[in-house]
Image (tube, rainbow, N blue to C red):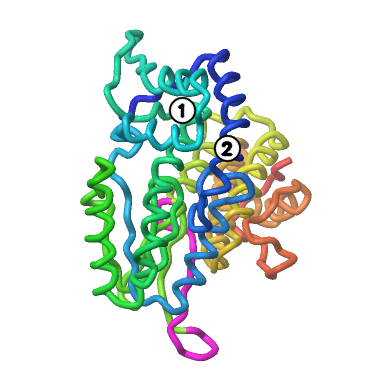
Amino acid sequence: MRPLGIPTVRDRVVQQAAKIVMEPIFETNFLECSYGYRPKRSSGQAVLAVKEALVRGWAALDADIEGFFDQVDRGILMGLVRRRISDRRVLKLIDQWLRAGVVIEGRRQATVCGVPQGGVISPLLANIYLHTLDRWWQDKHTGVGQLHRYCDDFVVVCRSRKAAEQARDLIAGFLGRLKLTLHPEKTQVVEMDRDGFDFLGFHFHKLPSRRTGRLVPYAWPSQRAMARVRARIRQLTERTRLRVGLGELVETLNRTIRGWRAYFSLGNSTKRLADLDRYVRSRLWRFLQKRQGPRGRLRPADFVEWERRSGLTYFYPTGRRGLRPYMPQGEGCRKAV
């Protein structure tokens, strides 16, 4: 388990004030290939950029920096901050935040390196540190492939496997100068016509187009993302929540569905979203059956009518795709409401 360095309320206020002052100064230098924790930049933009790059790219380096927040060298980081910030008071505050340590089982434990993960200013400091990677790659190696980075997770899209392997070796060498290493298990070179890779919750793969038959890039929710949202739905509809009002249950489900749909509608997610719609209604059917008890029996037609009037939303909106209502199998009798 990774220790978190969560600041107190007073420190959070001061960190936010420092970030408001520092962020515009460093934003003038940050590059377009960086998307994480920046104003007017998002993971959705990174997903679309990677998908566009894969139109001409046939291999990719899917990379992750091992224990990034725990391994950042404070001397290097403070040197990078001093290039743009000269106020000694601000520099002293940053140095104090870096040395604050973590609390484990009620005891403060000092740390000799790393950036406290959980602080307001930590993402900005992480981007300052890895901006050196962005700049080095743009200045010297754009011919090898296109770099797209979201904090410590990044992808290099290349035209061939050889170029992707070259990118891996080049980046591993440069990260050594920053006293960082690539994660041996999470870093891989992928040929897009054979395999795919996961990035920011999406799985990227090149498959034949239904129209032309040519290989084109697709992006859909990864297995891990699907497992997480299914687990959330299962948690909301488990037996221990039978006393929760149906209106409250639907409202909670709708918040989960809308948030998940807003993000994953960026990709080619129709089938996965429809699968989740069926899963939600299957869970609700079982939930309502259990709610009525052993003597009550729920008819499929009554369930469909309740669903229609409940205000439950869809992962894939019915206005965009004519999904048929979920029709449970089996017999029943009493109405759900």
| Residue 337 image label | none
User: Which quarter of the rendering shows the C terminus?
Assistant: top right
Q: Which residue is mark 1?
A: 118
Query: On the rendered structure, is 249 left or right of 38?
Result: right
For the point 48% across and 48% down, the residue is: 230
Please say if 26 is above or below 142. Answer: above
For the point 24% across and 67% down, the residue is: 166
Query: On the rendered structure, is 133 left or right of 316?
Result: left
Disc 2 marks a residue whose amino acid type is Glu
The tag earlier along the polypeptide, 1 or 2, is: 2
Query: On the rendered structure, is 242 left or right of 57?
Result: right
For the point 51% across and 41% down, the residue is: 232
- Report the span colored magenta: 209-224
210 falls in the magenta region: yes
Q: Residues within 10 Å of mark 1 (few under 14, many from 20)?
A: some
Label 2 residue SS: helix
Residue projecting furthest to the top: 107
Disc 1 marks a residue whose amino acid type is Gly
